[in-house]
Amino acid sequence: MRSGLSSYLEPRTPAIAPEVAELLSDDGFARQIGDLARDLDRDPSEVRAEATGYLREMGATHTPRGMRDWARFSHWLARAHDLVLDPEQIRRLRRLDRRQSLLFPFSHRSYLDGVTVPAALARHGIAPSFVLAGANLDRFPFNHLLRRAGFVYIRRSTGDLPVYRVALRAYIARLIHNRRNLCWSIEGGRTRTGKLRPPTYGVLRYVIDALDADPAARAVIVPVSVVYEQLHEVGRMTAEARGVRKQPEDLRWLWEFGRSQRERFGRAYLETGEPIPLPERLTALRGDEPSGRHMVERIALETSHRINQATPVTTTAVVCLALLAADRAVTLDEVLATIAPLAAYIIERGRPVAGAASLTDRATIRRTLDDLSRSGVLNGYHGGTEAVWRVAPGQHLVAAFYRNTAVHMLVDRAIGEISLVAAAESDGNALRTALRETLRLRDLLKFDFFFPPRREFAEEMAAELALAGLNRDFTAAEARDRLGRDPLLVAHLVLRPFLEAYQVVADRLAAWTDDEPFDAERLLDECLRVGRQWALQKRLSSEESVSLELFKPAVRLARHRGLVDGTAGRGASRAAFLAEIRDAVRRVDAIAALAARDRS
């Protein structure tokens, strides 16, 4: 008798998933297919057959055996980490469960996320989720197992598949109608930098369509953050960000990935953010914007913002920040001295710390330094009078990945510092100049970071300046004095890699002639090549800025500002864009100079 995964090795025609069977017998779905056939000028039976094929491709269920086998397999795959959850958060989810669909959009730093999140929720008594996964992972024989554990395989590119889109919208609507829980990556793919990527809208749009079509349906978004002390796959991801071809996700890849998890790599922390009752939120947004044009985008950004708020800072993140700041070998005392003001700021701002760890505990930081040394991220030297550590050669991007898992906590602080440099240069009202600069930086960085609406952001930045003791009108001299005395300066560590990447894009865009058709792929390739040149020339502070993940938001910003279309006369606007970014980089360099002076 066969047992475990071996029983999935023989291909066979799967039973029709319950929601698929319901749709195929539903008169409303039949009318949708008929209307689509008329719009496409195609035979209705042909369109229905195509839709049926797509639904069978997506259809998933939860069988007792499939769930047991998946639990064993997921435990084996995630064995490198000890998962930490908050019991109180789980209790709150149980109270919400089964009365409505719980929607779990999660951050995506690892292939393990799609394993960790649904398995952990089911293990703690939450109704099993349907996991929306990329069709690139639809590989025999594991696809047979995963479909019986609730995995729904979705194609990434559906622009030329109108029948597929209608089938997917109907399938998600049926899941919502049946109060099924859903789980998916809000980013669409894994981050290559460590920070949260911009959200994708497709799944969320279909969910909102389902709620609009069924007033009785109920759904709550539960933002989910997963952060790891270390990951085996970071080196590969950072290489992909620099243009290295992604390895095909086939059976050989899955086997190699599973084998790589043999080495223990610390803890993984699963946290949930403040839930968003979706029908109520939609009603409120329609009151603000009756057209509903930006409704999906606003909910997606709010969800991402809440994921960031829930993401705790790890000791790995702060240690990597300290080592990257030093850019040389440092002692344990020097690491602790760098972390101390950062830890005080995190406590003052009420930010969560993973595992409630003390970021200033000597033994905790020493253990983190040793763990990073064992994994090869750091080099330690113990032959002198004191042990010292530095970022290992070729590991700066890996260290930056871990640092960036906490970068969202420091963005407001970094923007506040740059605004004080602008205020220190001002001949007029320094406070007004500072607040105007914060809004300018918000608009400049809005495709990389998640900010609240402008009014709320202005209030947050006023509170940030108040933390620095500048809660009233102040002069340029007072701004200079505050910057000179501040024990915590982070703008060069947090924002310089992004702004320097923007500068590369703006420089190449400014060189683009008006009569030349814009080609985003060609521009990005040129940015990679020129970025590497600038890094070799030390025109960039580090190679971290030479990254497709950092270039692409800059291109989105340029497109948003109308700088990439073929309209004549764009040269002046592109030059102004470059000048604006150079100005921001110059101010960040001023912060870096102050920080270097304090360390000397």
Image (tube, rainbow, N blue to C red):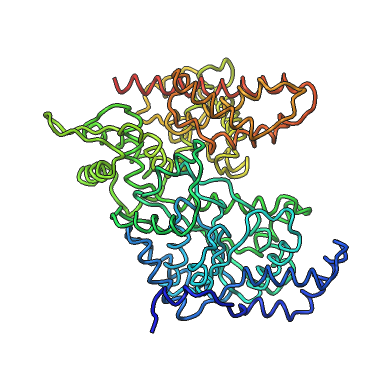
Give the residue drawn at x 71%, y 29%: 563
Q: Position of residue 370 (x, y in %)?
A: 23, 43
Task: Write down the quadrant of residue 5 in the picture.
Answer: bottom left
Task: Write down the quadrant of residue 444 in the picture.
Answer: top right
Task: Write down the quadrant of residue 480 in the picture.
Answer: top left
In the image, farthest residue toward the front: 10
Look at the picture and state if 418 lies above or below 10: above
Query: 336 or 178: nearer the eye?
Result: 178
Image quarter where the C terminus lies is: top left
Whether residue 416 is visible, yes or no, is no
Look at the picture and state if 399 lies above or below 114: above
Query: 407 or 569: nearer the eye?
Result: 569
Look at the picture and state if 241 lies above or below 274: above
> Is 505 on the left or on the right of 30, as rendered?
left
Query: 454 or 299: nearer the eye?
Result: 299
> Is 345 on the left or on the right of 202, as rendered?
left
In the image, farthest residue toward the top: 427
> Is 444 on the left or on the right of 397, as rendered?
right
Query: 573 or 299: nearer the eye?
Result: 573
Give the residue drawn at x 37%, y 61%: 78
Q: Position of residue 62 (x, y in %)?
A: 52, 77
Whether residue 398 is visible, yes or no, is yes
